Image (cartoon, rainbow, N blue to C red):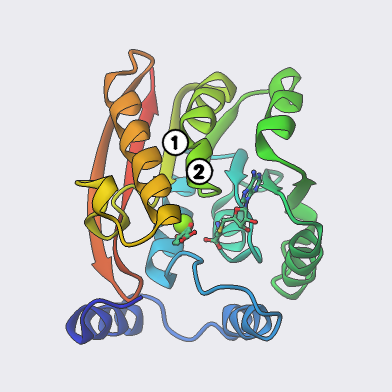
Amino acid sequence: MSDSPLFAAVDAYLEETFLGQDSVLDQVLESSQAAGMPDIQVSALQGRFLMLMARLTGAERILEIGTLAGYSTIWLARGLKPGGQVTTLELRQNQVELSEKHFEIAGVVDRIRCVQGEAVRTLPRLADEPPFDLIFIDADKPNYPAYLDWSIKLARPGALIITDNVVRAGNVLDPDGAPNQIEQDNAHAVRDFNALLAKDDRVEAVAMQQIGAKGHDGFALAVVK
Ligand code: SAH
Ligand code: DHB
Ligand code: MG
């Protein structure tokens, strides 16, 4: 998915400079690949960015929508305040089990709660709990507009909502021109999501495009009023 050797080389340089060796995460990525997971987890640099955003918000309660194999979840858990918890929502039971194995490897299993099911069905169950300090949206793109609405409802004032994949290699500019039907649907959904996010009075928001080892995509950031 890497668009340019230069982007990947710069990511490698930045990883070398800012991250150093991390045998735990290497092991997690190897295990994910061995289990046949697609290589769509956040990059290591994005992972550390998520960890720092958790620090910045003083997060004790983090919500993630879309676990895959738990890579981003581990980064988020590393940024928690002591005693805090990440709740991560995942459709597929086999991926919940794989993620839990990875949380043990990473020594964060006690700080993570996995909730299996369609996120549009599991999100409403969280409404009776205390609100979240940080939310990371990264599951199926067609449900992004629904995830946005739930995230705002479940967040405390001042909370940060981070959303992955809001650029889709530029397909967001012309969703109908995307190379296949699935990507057209994804691009339409993130375009709708961006428009909703930008005009929602409950948040102040921006989106930033990113290039790197994962190709060309973007994060949206929103602070809840
Ligand atoms: N956040 C992960 C990557 C998530 S990939 C990381 O960066 O490491 C997107 C995930 O969303 C996949 O695991 C997929 O199974 C899950 N997903 C897809 N549709 C879903 C739904 N309706 N409800 C919950 N999870 C869903
Ligand atoms: C896809 C999903 C992601 O969350 C991502 O970061 C990259 C690609 C996808 O479904 O194509
Ligand atoms: Mg993603």
Question: Would you say 33 lies left or right of 92 here?
Answer: left
Q: Residue at x 53, y 32 (%)?
A: 147
204 or 18: nearer the viewer? 204
Q: Where is residue 55 in the image (x, y as percent from the top left)?
A: 47, 48
Q: Are marks 1 and 2 in contact (CB under 8 Å)?
A: yes
**Is 213 located above or below residue 76 in the figure?**
below
Q: Label 1 vs label 2: CA separation?
A: 8 Å
**Amino acid at circle 1:** Ile
Q: Residue at x 72, y 62 (%)?
A: 108
- SS of the residue under disc 2: strand
The reply to whether the residue tagged 2 has its Cβ within 8 angstroms of ligand 3 is no
Q: Mark 2 points at which residue?
A: 137
Q: Residue at x 67, y 38 (%)?
A: 119
Question: Would you say 129 lies left or right of 191 here?
Answer: right
Q: Mark 1 points at which residue?
A: 161
> Which one is earlier in the sequence, the residue at label 1 or at label 2?
2
